[in-house]
Image (cartoon, rainbow, N blue to C red):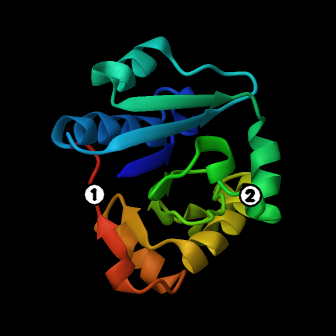
Amino acid sequence: MRIGIDISQLAYEETGVSNYLFKLLVNLFKIDKKNDYILFFSSLRRDLPLFIESKLREGNRATIKKFKFPPTFLEIIWNKYHSFPIERFVGDVDIFITSDWTEPPSRNAKKATIIYDLVVYKNPQETSSKIVETHKRKLKWVKMESDLIFCISEASKKDAMEILGIEEKRLKVIYPGI
């Protein structure tokens, strides 16, 4: 199986999202010896940190596809207009996993995503209006298209059910620190 994963958030070292995603990948690669991974990375001004890149390439099971698109551009084409399927960037994949900022459409791939929190609904005043709008657009597509949604806690899972109306069978908890 070919599994695609958006790793763009790894450019922001020392954030909760980056730490969670990195540890999830490292541990997934340790236990999964069958599947091939296509990792999508895009940032206009940031690079994938060398330590992270070398760790992800260990064993040559992951191919990293790098792009220099600004996050705002991807937010517009994927969250706002929902065009340009992810397969145009990474090739055919069976599953594509998104993380924090954007939600690309797919032609044929099953989709999964990670929900860290729903602060944009619960406490929108605690973040910028641009971030609130971006995440709400992304979550609209998650609700409609994601086959599986990973939550980092039971509280995030409960919020996804209550606030977004996502049925429990599509939600799985994977705690940080695995």
Q: Tell which of 176 and 97 is nearer to you.
A: 97
Q: Position of residue 50 (x, y in %)?
A: 47, 12
Label 1 SS:
loop
Q: Position of residue 3 (x, y in %)?
A: 41, 49
Q: Residue at x 37, y 26 (%)?
A: 56
| Numbered tag placed on residue 87 in the rendering | none
Q: Tell which of 174 and 58 is nearer to you.
A: 58
- On the image, which quarter does residue 60 sit in? top left
Q: Residue at x 39, y 16 (%)?
A: 54
Q: Is residue 21 above or below residue 14?
A: below
- Residue 47 shows in the view: yes
Q: Tell which of 42 and 161 is nearer to you.
A: 42
Tell me the kind of residue under disc 1.
Ile
Q: Position of residue 102 (x, y in %)?
A: 65, 53
Q: Is residue 12 above or below residue 106?
A: above
Residue that protrudes farthest toward the top in the picture: 50
Label 2 SS:
helix
- On the image, which quarter does residue 171 sit in? bottom left
- Disc 2 to disc 1, how far (Cα)? 26 Å
Q: Is residue 82 above or below residue 17?
A: below
Comes first in the chain, label 2 or label 1 = 2
| Neighbour tally class for label 1: few under 14, some 14-19, many 20 plus, Cα within 10 Å | some
Q: Decide: marks 2, 1 in contact (CB < 8 A)?
A: no
Q: Is residue 142 left or right of residue 116?
A: right
Residue topped by disc 2: 78
Tell me the kind of residue under disc 2.
Trp
Q: Residue at x 76, y 47 (%)?
A: 74
| Neighbour tally class for label 2: few under 14, some 14-19, many 20 plus, Cα within 10 Å | many
Residue topped by disc 1: 174
Work out which quarter of the rendered image holds the C terminus and state it: top left
